[in-house]
Image (cartoon, rainbow, N blue to C red):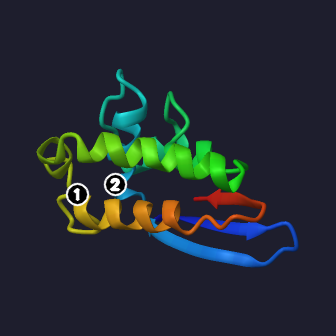
């Protein structure tokens, strides 16, 4: 299972497309929600008590999404060992590659109007 995120301009042009495993969502959610408790991937996607980070990103403008992603990245980078300990046992995804994807997303926002579309 994975999420998809697209950055689309006001003419329908794709400025970027990303896809990554749901296995690392708990890392971002732990940054966003102080009371977050690690869940199975199924529960995080379908039965979470908090909306997952990618659901929050969906519908934001490009700049709003960039600021949101930046806050997640800063939170993750503030305690790398904590989040590396959350690396999935199955090896699908890891802290370092997740931060790279989020950084790529944040840095792709152009100066013209865009909107984030995320699904999973």
The answer to whether residue 40 of the structure is visible from this angle is no
Within-10-Å neighbours for mark 1: few <14, some 14–19, many 20+: some
Q: Quadrant of residue 5?
A: bottom right
x, y (%) of residue 114? Answer: 75, 62
Q: Quadrant of the C terminus?
A: bottom right
Q: Position of residue 87 (x, y in %)?
A: 20, 55
Q: Which residue is mark 2?
A: 24
- Residue ID at (15%, 41%): 82
Element class at badge 1: loop
Total labels: the figure holds 2
Q: Is residue 12 above or below residue 76?
A: below
Q: Residue at x 43, y 33 (%)?
A: 32
Q: Position of residue 46 (x, y in %)?
A: 54, 44
**Which residue: 37% across, 49% down?**
73
First reached walking from the N terminus: tag 1 or tag 2:
2
- Which residue is denoted by mark 1 in the rendering? 88
Helix, strand or loop at label 2? It is helix
The local crowd at label 2, few if under 14, some if 14 to 19, many if 20 or more residues have their Cα within 10 Å, is many
Residue 79 in sight here: yes
Spot occupied by residue 97 in the image (x, y as percentages of width and height): 29, 68
Q: Nearer the viewer, residue 57 or 75?
A: 75
Viewer-proximal residue, 119 or 42? 119
Residue at the limit of the structure toward the top, as seen here: 35
| Mark 1 and mark 2: Cα distance apart in space | 7 Å
Q: Is residue 43 above or below residue 6?
A: above
| Residue farthest right in this picture | 11
Q: Residue furthest front?
A: 111
Q: Marks 2 and 1: in contact by CB < 8 Å?
A: yes
């Amino acid at each position: 299972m994975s999420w998809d995120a697209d950055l689309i301009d006001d003419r329908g042009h794709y400025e970027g497309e990303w896809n990554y495993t749901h296995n690392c969502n708990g890392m971002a959610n732990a940054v966003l929600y102080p009371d977050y408790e690690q869940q199975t991937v199924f529960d995080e996607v379908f039965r979470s008590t908090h909306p997952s980070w990618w659901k929050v990103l969906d519908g934001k403008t490009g700049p709003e999404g960039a600021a949101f992603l930046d806050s997640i990245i800063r939170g993750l980078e503030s305690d790398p060992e904590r989040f590396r300990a959350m690396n999935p046992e199955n090896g699908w995804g890891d802290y370092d590659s997740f931060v790279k994807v989020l950084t790529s997303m944040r840095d792709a926002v152009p100066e013209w109007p865009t909107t984030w579309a995320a699904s999973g």
